[in-house]
Each structure stands twice: as structure tokens, then as C-alpha cells.
Image (cartoon, grey):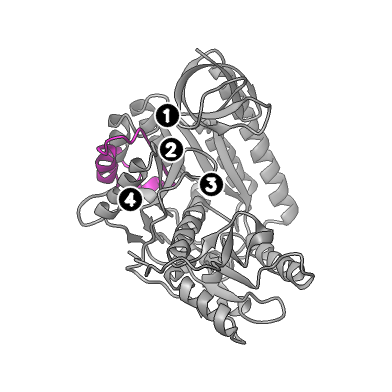
């Protein structure tokens, strides 16, 4: 675990703006980066125009995400050139830094600094050198370190009252389409003791809810315990009211884990379990190690054992070799599971992955059509689920003020459904009972009971 060297605060403390892209793990990492820099004499700012340093914490899961970062670097350099921002240093961190360090450190559109996912503890020294010496070449730090785990400060998560806690990094599954094993490395665990200490710090600072994170969180396995055992340990922490987790893998969602979720009142009954496809033939080409039948058995077991459980999932359409019949199997799976929410993507090849060697034989037009059909089906499923919820009473955790209407607050049920409460004076962290009276898009409308 990293232990940054502490320095006295500088009288002219450089201000750092961190812009986060991608998943919740990157959000957590950005908090950890901020904590490292603050402990080493830097100041974090939320105002781009005030920043002396801009760090982009990046994602490489899809090609479009990388294109956005190159465009953003160019935009920031242009703003700097025209004195519209003061930042002298534009740095790139995270997955894209790990994968494309050479491209990011060269050329007219280069970044001033590149730091991979296991190198954040070097940021203070790298930034100090840039500020003091202004080297001609951008400093680059990449490479995976098994021992390196970061801990974010126990501060409020910015968009709701759930604090993110990464319990491991990397992934040992080798799904043929996925770049994560390259950018994040093999799976490496935080110790149970480190995780418990981090959550106790969050609770001690007033937090009541945590979301446990991992590239494949359900695969957590230390010499002492597996993920089910970790959940039981975390649930013993006094003052912790709710535990959520994501993202899981169907192969690790076994009956002992489902039993632990059912047994523990503080573990929220919401499972995010990516299916990716409903076709066994496509799943085999993806190297997912399960079939649609075993996936549906998992869902049925969870429904039988966990009251009020809800599901969300991920799907890729247009994977190489996916036929119309394969795609229809995906639609059948969505109808059967009845997800609250799905995250749906068109397949795009990632260089270096096994799937990139396959013929990308589904046209872009067909991918778009399948994506639209899948989204439309999920909209229909959600409409039916939402109608069944009207009139029910639920306990919700208040997450803060809503952007609109004025006087409204946003809240979330234990099984992860969003609720808007109009003319409500509840504050962040309150747990209140509400009656569901309506639904607008994916958000329920509720009133106090």
C-alpha cells in the first residue's frame, strides 16, 4: 500500500484540477490521486481556470474513449496557448497512460506528463521536477506493481452518499474483447485488514454506505477469505448501514455468495452481472466461461434467495461472427431476466486483444440497428417493471438535492432504484420511507409515508 511522504504545505501551493473519465474505479483513483498530492503540498481545485496543473484520469475500454482524450489534450493546449487557462502542466493518468504512453509523450499534441495506474505515488516528484526544471521530454512512469494499492481519503463521494472502496485491481479473466488485463494488469488483492481499516475510516468520518469495487469484484480471494467472507467481515463494522458492490462475473456468483448476500441485511439486493450475449456460440468466442442456461440459473437462484433483488447488466452487439440468430438469443435473455438497466455497446476491436484478430464481419449499420433494437426492448422491460412498482412503499437513502425541481431531493432504494421526492426537506444520508406514486424515465416519483 502506498504511503506518500508528507511535506509541509507550501505557501504557493500549486492547484491541481483532476478530470475523470470511465468507470467508478477511475473515480476512486482520482480521489486517491488527490489525496496523495494534497499530502505532498499540492491543493486540489474544482475550477479548471484556477488550476496550475490539469490531470486527465483516463479510460481505454473503447476506442472512442481514447479519441476523446487526444481531443481533450489538444483543446487544453489551445486554451493554454490563448491564455484562457493558466495550467502549465497537462498530464495523463490511468489506463490510457498505461497503454499509449509513447504516443502521449510525443508530438505536437503531447501531454506534459504520463503516469500509469500503479505509478500515482510518483506524481508529486514528477510534478516537482516539471515545475522546477521544465525538462524537454515529458516524464513517463508506467508498469504494473503487485504491491501498489491506493487508498482514497474518507471524504464524501461527490454524487451521492456511497463511498467507493476498491478491494482489488486488475483481472485474471481473459475475455477476448477486453483490454483491461493489459491496462490494469493481473488481479491483485488489497488485504482484508486494509479494506476493513479503510471502511472504518469512512464510517468514522460520518459515512454510512460503501460500494466495493473491482474489475471483477466477486473474484476477490485473499489467503484468508473469498468475496463472500469479505462481505461478512465488512458487514460486522459498526455504523455501516449499506454495502453495494460491482462489477461481478457470472462464474464467481456462486450459491455461497448469494447466500451471504441474502443473510446480510446491510448488503443491498442489487446485482450488476454482465451477460455480454445470450448466444452460447458468441459467449464461447468471447471466452466468458458460462452459457446462457447457467446465467439464467444464477438469476433464478438469486431471485429465490434474495428478496426484492434487482439486476443490471452489460451487452455487446455485433461481436465478430454474431449472426441474427445469435442476436435473437440476446433479446430472449433480456426478456427472461427483466433487468432494471442494461449498458449496451457496439463491438469495436481493441488492438492487442484476441478478438481483434477475428474478422469484424458485422457491418456498422447492422451493429447500430441491433443496438437500437436491444435498447428499445430494454425500455419496454423497464416500463413494465416501473408500472409494477407504483403504489408500493420503499425505504430510501437520500443522496442530496436534485437539480430540479427546486426543493426536491434525490434518493435511492436498497435495490438501486432512483427516487425523486418533491418539496422534501430530508438531507443527505437520511433513510426514510416513501410511497412510489409515479415514474419519469428511469426515476420514480415518491412521497413521504
Query: How many numbered marks are there?
Result: 4
Q: How far is the residue under mark 2 from the one under mark 1? A: 7 Å
Q: Which residue is mark 2?
A: 271
2 relative to 22, above or below: below
In the structure shown, which secondary structural element does the residue marked by tag 1 occupy?
loop
Residue shown at the point (27%, 39%) measured from the top left: 237
Label placed on residue 198:
4
Q: How far is the residue under mark 2 from the one under mark 3? A: 17 Å
Quarter holding residue 3: bottom left
Q: Which residue is mark 3?
A: 277
Mark 1 packing: few (<14 Cα in 10 Å), some, or many (20+)?
Answer: some
Q: Which residue is mark 1?
A: 309
Position in image of residue 52 (x %, y %): 62, 67
Residue shown at the point (69%, 64%) measured from the top left: 72
Quarter holding residue 6: bottom left
Asked if the residue under mark 1 is in contact with the one under mark 2, i.e. CB atoms within 8 Å, the reply is yes
Q: How far is the residue under mark 1 from the one under mark 3? A: 22 Å
* Earlier-in-chain disc, 2 versus 1: 2
Q: Is residue 290 visible?
A: no
In the structure shown, which secondary structural element does the residue marked by tag 2 occupy?
strand
Residue at the right extreme of this rendering: 82
Amino acid at each position: 500500500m502506498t504511503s506518500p511522504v508528507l511535506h509541509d504545505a507550501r505557501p504557493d501551493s500549486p492547484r491541481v484540477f483532476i478530470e475523470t473519465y470511465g468507470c467508478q474505479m477511475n473515480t476512486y483513483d482520482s480521489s486517491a490521486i488527490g489525496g496523495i498530492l494534497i499530502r505532498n503540498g499540492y491543493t486540489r481545485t474544482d475550477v479548471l481556470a484556477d488550476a496550475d496543473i490539469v490531470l486527465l484520469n483516463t479510460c481505454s475500454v473503447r476506442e472512442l474513449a481514447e479519441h476523446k482524450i487526444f481531443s481533450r489534450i489538444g483543446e487544453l493546449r489551445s486554451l493554454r496557448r490563448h491564455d484562457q487557462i493558466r495550467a502549465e502542466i497537462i498530464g495523463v493518468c490511468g489506463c490510457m497512460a498505461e497503454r499509449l504512453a509513447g504516443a502521449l509523450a510525443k508530438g505536437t499534441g503531447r501531454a506534459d506528463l504520463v503516469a500509469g495506474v500503479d505509478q500515482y505515488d510518483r506524481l508529486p516528484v514528477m510534478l516537482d521536477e516539471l515545475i522546477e526544471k521544465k525538462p524537454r521530454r515529458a516524464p513517463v512512469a508506467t508498469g504494473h506493481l503487485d504491491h501498489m494499492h491506493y487508498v482514497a481519503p474518507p471524504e464524501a463521494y461527490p454524487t451521492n452518499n456511497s463511498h467507493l472502496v476498491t478491494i482489488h485491481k486488475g483481472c485474471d479473466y481473459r475475455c477476448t474483447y477486453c483490454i483491461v488485463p493489459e491496462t490494469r494488469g493481473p488481479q491483485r488483492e488489497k488485504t482484508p485488514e486494509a479494506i476493513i481499516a479503510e471502511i472504518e475510516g469512512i464510517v468514522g468520518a460520518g459515512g454510512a454506505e460503501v460500494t466495493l469495487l473491482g474489475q471483477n469484484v466477486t473474484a476477490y480471494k485473499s489467503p484468508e477469505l473469498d468475496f463472500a467472507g469479505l462481505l461478512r467481515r465488512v458487514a460486522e463494522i459498526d455504523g455501516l448501514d449499506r454495502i453495494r458492490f460491482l462489477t461481478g462475473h457470472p462464474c464467481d456468483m456462486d450459491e455461497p455468495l448469494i447466500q451471504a448476500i441474502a443473510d446480510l441485511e446491510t448488503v443491498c439486493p442489487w446485482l450488476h452481472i454482465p451477460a455480454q450475449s445470450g448466444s452460447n456460440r458468441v459467449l464461447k468466442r468471447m471466452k466468458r466461461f458460462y452459457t446462457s442456461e447457467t446465467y439464467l440459473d444464477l438469476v433464478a437462484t438469486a431471485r429465490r434467495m434474495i428478496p426484492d433483488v434487482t439486476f443490471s447488466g452489460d451487452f455487446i452487439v455485433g461481436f465478430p461472427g454474431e449472426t441474427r440468430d445469435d442476436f435473437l438469443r440476446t433479446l430472449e435473455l433480456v426478456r427472461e431476466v427483466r433487468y432494471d438497466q442494461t449498458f449496451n455497446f457496439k463491438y469495436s476491436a481493441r488492438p492487442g486483444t484476441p478478438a481483434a484478430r477475428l474478422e469484424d464481419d458485422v457491418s456498422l449499420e447492422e451493429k447500430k440497428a441491433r443496438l437500437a433494437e436491444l435498447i428499445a426492448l430494454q425500455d419496454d422491460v423497464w416500463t413494465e417493471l416501473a408500472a409494477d412498482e407504483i403504489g408500493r412503499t420503499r425505504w430510501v437513502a437520500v443522496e442530496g438535492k436534485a437539480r430540479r425541481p427546486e426543493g426536491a431531493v434525490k434518493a435511492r432504494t436498497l435495490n438501486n432504484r432512483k427516487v425523486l421526492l418533491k418539496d422534501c426537506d430530508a438531507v443527505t444520508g437520511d433513510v426514510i420511507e416513501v410511497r412510489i406514486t409515479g415514474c419519469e424515465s428511469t426515476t420514480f416519483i415518491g412521497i413521504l409515508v
